[in-house]
Image: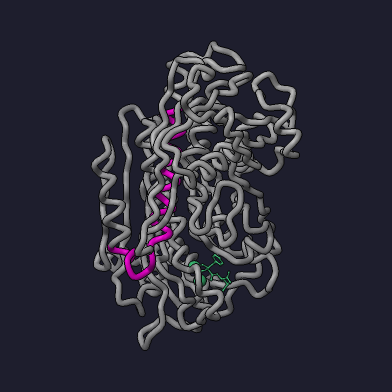
Amino acid sequence: MQIEIKNQKLNEQKETTRIVFVVAKDFTHSWIEDKDTLSMLDFKAENEECLFVATHNILYVGCESLDADDIRLAAAKAYEYLQKTTLRQACIGTYSLDCPGINIKAMVEGFTLASYTFNAYKSKKEISKFQKIILCLEDYSRSDVSMETANKALNAGTIIAKATNFAKEIVNAIPHDMTPLALANVAQTLSALPNVTCEVMDKDFLEAQGMNAFLAVNRASVHPPKLIHLTYKPEDAKKRIIYVGKGLTYDSGGLSLKPSEHMVTMKADKSGGAAVISILKGAAELKLPFEIHAIIGATENMIGGNAYKPDDVLIAKNGKTIEVRNTDAEGRLVLADCLAYAQEFKPDLLIDMATLTGACVVALGEFTTGVMGHNETLKASFAESCAKSGELSGTLPFNKHLKKLIKSSVADISNISSSRYGGAITAGLFLDHFIEEENKDKWLHLDIAGPAYVEKAWGYNPFGASGAGVRANLYWMIDEAKK
Ligand code: BES
Ligand code: ZN
Ligand code: ZN
């Protein structure tokens, strides 16, 4: 799907279908030509409802407000409607009353996110005829959006949404195909981008580094582990931002085997890894002024005679000993070693992303990312940018009482809490044991277990992977670059 900007009047595109937003259920706006028809057909303009008025070749779409996320939603619904028709293109105005760049960017994101379909495993691929959206700068609102502003917004919106779709494609791939090696190969393709390099480390490296927690999780898998390290290093980078992603290409639970109904969707346990790869891709394409690293611990968590066991004690890379009480709490073991590795590169900011706990989904619901860390300012700035991106986040607070629940009688720390409550936070506090003192205030932990995989479509997220965390972090870095 292509989006083109034209310095032309929307109303002059009579031969092309026009998409018209009905904003705030208000039919009195000057741009609504079919007031009577809409009333007659009882069009309510609710929930991004679509109505096609053939006589004027106009698709009306309900848009709750001109806030960025409402624009994203309406654009996505318009696209969904159009791609089911035989139409090839449509045009739309900019609704640039207040913030031209922001609104155009949001619209582009909505269209591009909606254009993603996952049909790799369908024998008959449905190919939509719909190919092009024309954004007309001269519409009913104001005509002072410059071509330059509009093109910048188009470029940024496209990069951000395509990076999100890139993550979806990785996560949706089945575990048989997207093995740790295959994930590493996807990461390698990004080294074609300017200033991007990719290193992939094998089992020997992990052994030499003493990454025994990561290795233990991999032990019963037929696929060797991979430590993937992508770097984007522009000239005169302002800061070094290091992302660490959980890349469990499959989580069966290990010997603490998951019940079958919980095992389905565990191909999505690589969502943190997919997100950090895609964030780096987006950041490099946006040419953000930061040195960015994406470090992914890629492995499966399987069963077998050589599997690691509840009762084992592991010595992590940083020398801490971990009592294994549940092999299904494997993500934190992989991350523990990857976080220790990441800190050797002296980050200014360190962010880990993981589908870490079911408890986070219980706490915040399936739409929201759990944000944890010690630095209140950092958490607040992330939350602010995250909201602009249209992603939802909620902060989960650490406290000293929860910290005590992961004490172990036989090792330095246990991999599960002794209580059934507060599991998202105790997992975060487990990771805290692997954050060095000097980095405590530089660290953010994002639990994306809820939003990473969509089982019932919501907003502009279709069934399957959502690319959770990609837009939030790209928006956050764009805001950081302005500081
Ligand atoms: N990958 C899961 C967490 C998860 C659950 C992600 C649901 C997405 C949806 C993780 O490895 C896990 O199994 N965690 C356990 C931890 C428990 C054993 C302390 C969990 O959440 O049940
Ligand atoms: Zn698990
Ligand atoms: Zn897991």
Q: Is residue 127 above or below residue 319?
A: above
Quarter occupied by residue 37: top right
Give 126 or 241, whichever is nearer the viewer: 126
Residue, far bottom: 305
Question: Residue 280: horizontal and vertical position, in percent?
Answer: 38, 43
Question: Residue 406: horizontal and vertical position, in percent?
Answer: 61, 70
Is residue 176 one of those drawn in magenta? Answer: yes
Q: Is residue 435 above or below residue 416?
A: above
Give 18 or 208, whichever is nearer the viewer: 18
Q: Is residue 249 above or below residue 49?
A: below
Residue 384 can be seen in this image: no
Determine the main secondary structure of the stretch shown in magenta: helix
Give 125 or 241, whichever is nearer the viewer: 125
How many numbered discs sit on the rendered protein?
Answer: 0
Is residue 12 one of those drawn in magenta? Answer: no
The magenta stretch is: 154-181
Residue 22 can be seen in this image: yes
Is 155 left or right of 109, judged from the image as shown? left
The residue lying at 36 percent from left, 80 percent from top is 220
Question: Residue 42: horizontal and vertical position, in percent?
Answer: 75, 39
Question: Residue 193: horizontal and vertical position, in percent?
Answer: 27, 38
The residue lying at 63 percent from left, 19 percent from top is 98
The residue lying at 53 percent from left, 32 percent from top is 107
Quarter occupied by residue 183: bottom left
Residue, far top: 144
Quadrant of the snapshot with the N terminus: top left
Is 364 left or right of 56, judged from the image as shown? right
The residue lying at 45 percent from left, 44 percent from top is 115
